[in-house]
Image (cartoon, rainbow, N blue to C red):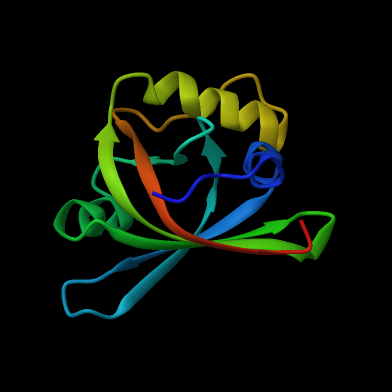
């Protein structure tokens, strides 16, 4: 496991977007812009249960993230890792915290019946530039 530097934790805790790549069944990449977070050790991505990225991660846990600082896209990090867990517990509170950070909303407007999951990603290789 690769350790997250303090500057990378800062990047992941800021209102910075990431692009998450998962692998489709045929091996082709699937890339989605996502809100990103960290617990200080792992990278956290919140998504809806049943979305393609969630289904891909259940089948093949290998992922890659590209994270850019919102005010300076030349300050960035690339994280190769594995999804260790798809956690439903606490996912609703987590998406609300992300909504406060990213859009200033107290709560995330969940569609009726939507279930959230947190992808807990173990970083295996990290490259950062300008952090």
- Image quarter hosting the C terminus: bottom right
> Going 38% across and 49% down the picture, which residue do you hit?
1
Q: Position of residue 114 (x, y in %)?
A: 32, 32
Q: Is residue 46 above or below residue 106?
A: below
Tell me the residue at 79%/63% (across/down).
130
Whole-percent x, y for residue 122 in the image: 37, 46
* Quadrant hosting residue 28: bottom left
Q: Is residue 81 left or right of residue 131?
A: left
The quadrant where residue 46 appears: top left
Q: Is 13 or 25 nearer to us in this picture?
A: 13
Relative to residue 31, is residue 27 drawn left or right? left
Q: Which quadrant of the structure image shows residue 125? A: bottom left
Which residue appears at 28% of the width and 69% of the height? Answer: 23
Residue 117, given in percent of the width and then of the height, sits at 32, 34
Question: Does 118 sit left or right of 73 as displayed?
Answer: left
Where in the figure is residue 21, as x and y percent of width and height? 41, 66
| Number of marks | 0
Horizontally, residue 76 falls left or right of residue 22, namely right
Q: Is residue 112 above or below residue 128?
A: above
Q: Residue at x 46, y 51 (%)?
A: 2
């Amino acid at each position: 496991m690769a350790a997250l530097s303090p500057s990378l934790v800062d990047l992941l805790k800021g209102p910075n977007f990431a692009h998450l790549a998962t692998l489709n069944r045929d091996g082709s990449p699937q890339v989605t812009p996502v809100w990103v977070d960290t617990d200080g050790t792992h990278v956290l991505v919140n998504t809806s249960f049943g979305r393609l990225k969630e289904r891909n991660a259940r089948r093949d846990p290998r992922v890659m993230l590209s994270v850019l600082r919102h005010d300076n896209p030349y300050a960035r990090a690339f994280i190769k890792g594995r999804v260790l867990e798809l956690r439903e517990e606490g996912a609703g509170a987590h998406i609300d915290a992300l909504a406060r950070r990213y859009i200033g909303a107290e709560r995330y407007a969940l569609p009726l019946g939507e279930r959230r999951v947190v992808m807990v990603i173990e970083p295996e290789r990290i490259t950062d530039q300008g952090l």
